[in-house]
Amino acid sequence: MSVQETSTDAQDDLVVQVRVNGESRRGFAEPRTLLSDFLRHELGLTGTHVGCEHGVCGACTVLIDGEPVRSCLMFAVQAGGKEIETVEGLAKGAEMHPIQQAFQENHALQCAFCTPGFLMTVSALLDTNPDPSEDEIREYLSGNVCRCTGYVGIVAAVQSAAKKLRDQGGTADER
Amino acid sequence: MSVDAKPTATLPQYVGARVLRVEDPEFLMGRAKYLDDITLPDMLHAAFVRSPVPHAEIVNVDIEAAQALDGVVAIYTAADIEANTTGPFVTALPRDEIMPVTRPLLASDRVRFVGEPIAVIVATSRYIAEDAAALVEIDFKDLGVVTNAEHGLTEDAVQLHDDVPGNNIAHIEFDSGDVDRVFDEAPHVFSKRFHIGRVTAAPLEGRGVIANYNPGADHLTIWSSTQMPHFARTLLAGTLGMAEKKMRVIAPAVGGGFGVKSCLFPEEAVIPVASRLLSRPVKWAEDRQEALSSSAHAKEIIMDLDIAVDDEGTFLAFRGNYVGDAGAYAIFPWTSLVDPLLAADVVAGIYDVRHVSYKVDSVLTNKCPAGPYRATGQTGGYLLRDSLIDDIARAMDIDPVELRLKNCIGNEPYVTATGFRYDGGSYAESIRKVCDMIGYDKLREEQAELRKEGRYLGIGVAPYVEPTAWGSKSAQKHGFPAEFYDSASVTVEPDGSVNVTVGTQSHGQGHVTSLAQVAADQLGVRLEDVKVLDSDSDTAVYGAGTFMSRTAVVSGGSIMRAAADVRERILALAGQELEVNPSDLEISNSTITVKGSPGKSMTVAEVSAVAYFGGERRGEVETLTSTRYYDPPETYSNGVIAAVVEVDVETGHVKMRHFAAVEDCGTMLNPMIIEGQVAGALAQGVGIALLENAVYDEQGQFNTASLMDYLYPSSNEVPTMDLAHLVTPSDVSEGGIKGMGEGGLVGSPVAVVNAVADALSPFGVTINSTPLRPADVLAKIEAAQAGNGGR
Ligand code: FES
Ligand code: FES
C-alpha cells in the first residue's frame, strides 16, 4: 500500500511513498497536493521547476515509470508506488550525463529555468528514438517552453547528445 | 566627446573565445536555487488578494471568513502597509513634461486594473494562503474604464488619477531641422499608422520575494527574483524606512528577466513589511496568472509616421506621433515613458535624415502597468518605421534592401538628428552580409516561381542600431535624466585565485563566464582561477543591475579598470621579488615572467603569498584588491535581421522558414553567449509578430491570464537560424566593448512583419498591427481585397 491515512499530521494529510531516482522516499501530502509541490517542497528536490502550474510550459516534466509527465498536472497521491526520475538523478556525482554535457557544449541553457524539464523530455525522446531528425526533435520538444534560447542550442544539443549516446552504445537511461 | 577610455586592454586570450559557461553544471544538475527553491526555518507563505475588476471604488473589504481559516496567520490591507512604510511608490523624472504618478503598495480606496493587489494573506502554507484569498469579500463601485490610450486622451474619458488630469503622464515634443518645410516641399510623403499589440516579457520563472526580518539584529534579508539587487535595496530602504546597512538583498538564481524584473513592484515592499510585522520569514512566489495579469505589460503604442521622400527614394524627413498605453500606473522607477519615448527617439535608426520631429504621449488606461521588455520601445518604433519603408519600396517599385542601403549612414561615428553619437558600426556592410547569408537574389527568384504555384514566400530585412550601455550618459541622451553608478572589485586571494564582484546581476546572460574572461585577460591569469560574484548586496560591490544591454560595458569596463590596478601591484611586488623593473615583466597563464630571460619567473600565487604573509617584503605595495567604477559614454551596437516566411493564404497561417542575423557589438567577449542572446531575442520576435497578445475586453477584463491564451513561441514556431558577426569596436568605451542582448528584438518583429507583407504583396496587403495570427492575416487579406489596403 503506497498511500495510507495518517493520524499524526493534519487530518487530511496522507503519507505518500515513491521511488525517486532509485531511492525509496516518503512524505506527507494533502489529497490536493500537486506532485510538483510534493517533489519540490516535501522531498526537497527543487530541480524540478514550476513555470505555469497548468500543464503548458513543461518546466515540471519528470519521468514516471519512464514516461515524461507534467508533475503539475498530477496529484502526489497518484504517484504513490511509482518510479520517478527527476533532473537530480541524471548526473553520477559530479559527472554529468551525456545529455547534460551536450546542453553545456551547445549553449542550450541561459536562465536554465526550463532546462530540467527539457533534460527529462530529451531523455525520454532519446530512449525511444536514438537518432531523431531535426523535425522530430522540434516536434517532440514543442510542449516544453524556453523563453531564453530560441531553441537553437537545445536542438543542437539533442542532436549531439543522441550521437554521444549512440557512440557509447547505451540508451539515455543506462549508459 | 570627452573620452577617458584609454585603451587598458592587454592582448586578448579569453576575450573573443567561445568559452563554455562555467555556471552550467550547477544548473544542469538541478542544483541552482531559484526563489521558490529556498525554504527557511519557520517560514510562512503569502498570497495576494487581487482586484477582479478593472476600475472601481473599494467600498468594503471583509476579511472575517479568511481570517477564521485554520492556518491563516495574518491578513494585511492598505492601512497596515501604509502605517509601516514611508509612503507609496511615486514614479517621477526631473523633466517638466512628466507628471509624477503615485502607486499605493496595496490599493486602499480604489483599484485601477484587474490584478491590482488589495490585501496580502500570510499563512502556514501557500495552499492555505490561496484558500483564504478566495474567501476575502470585497464590495466595489464601478467607475467605468479606459481601455484604449487614444480614448483616454479624449475630453469625456474616465479619469484614472486625480493628480494626472487628462490621463496623460507626459506630452513630449521634439523637433530638429526644418521638418514642416521639408514635408511641404517634398515630392512624396508616405504615412502609416501602426498599433503594436500589448505583450509581456513573461520570463519562465515569475516574480517572487522572500523576506526574513531578524528582530534581534534589526536586520532584513530579502531574496527577490530581480535583475537589480543593489538598486532594489536602495529603493526599498526608502520605502521601508531602513538603513541600507541593515538590509541585504539577494537575487538567487533568476529564471529570466527581459526587463520585467528591472522594475520594483509593490509586492517587493509588502512582503518585507509582513516579515517585519511577524518577525518570521515570509515567502511569496507568484503564479502564472499573476505574472500575466499583474507584473508588467509592455510595448503597446499607437503610432503614426510620415516620411518625406524625393523622386530617387532618398528619405528627407521623419515626423512621428507615439501614444503609449501606460496602463494604470507609471512603472517604478523607470516611468511609462520607456516605451513611447524610446520608440520615438530611435526613429532615425541607420537612416541619414536631418529633419526629424516627434510627439509622445503616455496615457493611463485600466490595464496592467507597462514597463521595460527587451528592446523597450524600440520594437514598436521599428515596426512602424521599417514597415512603412517597405510600403514605400513597394509604392516606388524599389527593392526594399536597395532603398535601405541608399539611405544608410556610413560606418564612421555619426551624430543623428536626434543628437545621439553612434560610435561607428557596420551599418551597410551588415545588410549586405545578411543578404549573402540568406541568398537574397536566389530567394527573390524562388519567390517568383512559388507565386506561380499559388505559394506565398516573403522576405523581410530589418537593420537596426541599438542604444546600449545604459549609464548616465545614455539615459540622459535618450530623455531619462538619471545618474547611474556601477562598479567592480577585483581581489587576488592568498592562494592566487581571484574573486571578482560586480553590481550587475546575471539571469541567463552568462556573466559569470564572460566577465571572468575579461578579468582573466586583464590580469593575465587562467580563467579557472577567476570567480565572478554578483547578485548579492552583501558580497558584491554596488551597481544598478542588468538591463538595457549594459553589463558587458559597465561591468566589463569596471573590471578592466580594477584589474589594471591589481595587475600593476602584482607586477610591482614581483619586480621586488625578482629584482627587476616591473616594466620588464609580463603575466600570462597566472605566471609572471621576465621579458627576455625565460628562466626567471614567479606564479601569481607566489606573489600573493608575499602580499598577504610576506611581512616587510611587501614594501610599499598596496593590497591586491581594487574597486573601480565605470559610467561609460553612449555606445551603439548594430545589426540586421532577415526573416523568411511562407504564408498560407487559405488558413492565414504564417510559417517561419528561416532567420538570419548579423550582430556587431564591437569587441566580443564570448561569441557563443552573444549568439545565444540573439537567438533568444529572435524567438521572442516571433512571439510579438505572430502570437503573443495581452488582451483586455472593452469592459477592461483581462482575457489572457493563462498560457493557453497567451502563446509563447515553441520549437515548432521558431525557425532555424544563421547567426554571424561583424566587429567594429567602439571608439569610446573601455576595450571597445558595446552592449548587446536586445538588438534581436529591435529588428525581428518588423523583419517578420515585413516578410509577411512581402509575401502578401500580390494582394496589396498593408500590415499595421501585431500580432498576425491566422485570423488576423485572413482579415487583412480580405480587407485588402475589399479595396482598402488591409486597414
Ligand atoms: S509547470 Fe507544469 S507544465 Fe508548466
Ligand atoms: S533557458 Fe531560460 S527559459 Fe529556457
Image (cartoon, helix red, strand yellow):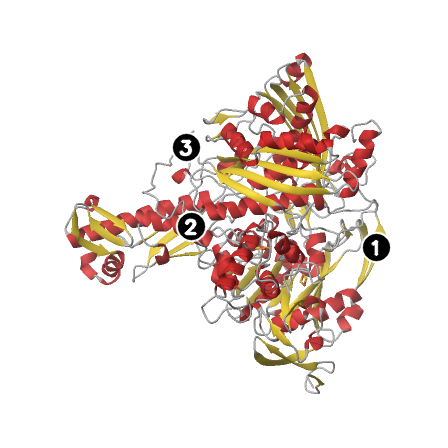
Mark 3 vs mark 1: in front: 3
CA distance for labels 2 and 3: 21 Å
Left or right: B457 as drawn, with respect to B54: left
Q: Secondary structure at mark 1?
A: strand
Q: Which mark is residue B452?
A: none
Q: Are marks 2 and 3 on the same chain?
A: yes
Query: As rendered, which of B274 and B288 lies closer to the eye?
Result: B288
Q: Position of residue B96 (x, y in %)?
A: 62, 33
Q: Are marks 2 and 1 on the same chain?
A: yes
Residue under numbered circle 3: B731
Residue under numbered circle 1: B140
Kind of residue indicated by mark 3 = Asp
| Tag 3 subunit | B
Kind of residue indicated by mark 1 = Phe
**Is A80 placed above or below B711 here?**
below
Kind of residue indicated by mark 2 = Leu
Q: Secondary structure at mark 2?
A: helix
Residue under numbered circle 2: B515
Query: As rendered, which of B225 and A25 lies closer to the eye?
Result: A25
Q: Position of residue B299 (x, y in %)?
A: 67, 41
Q: Residues within 10 Å of mark 1 (few under 14, many from 20)?
A: some
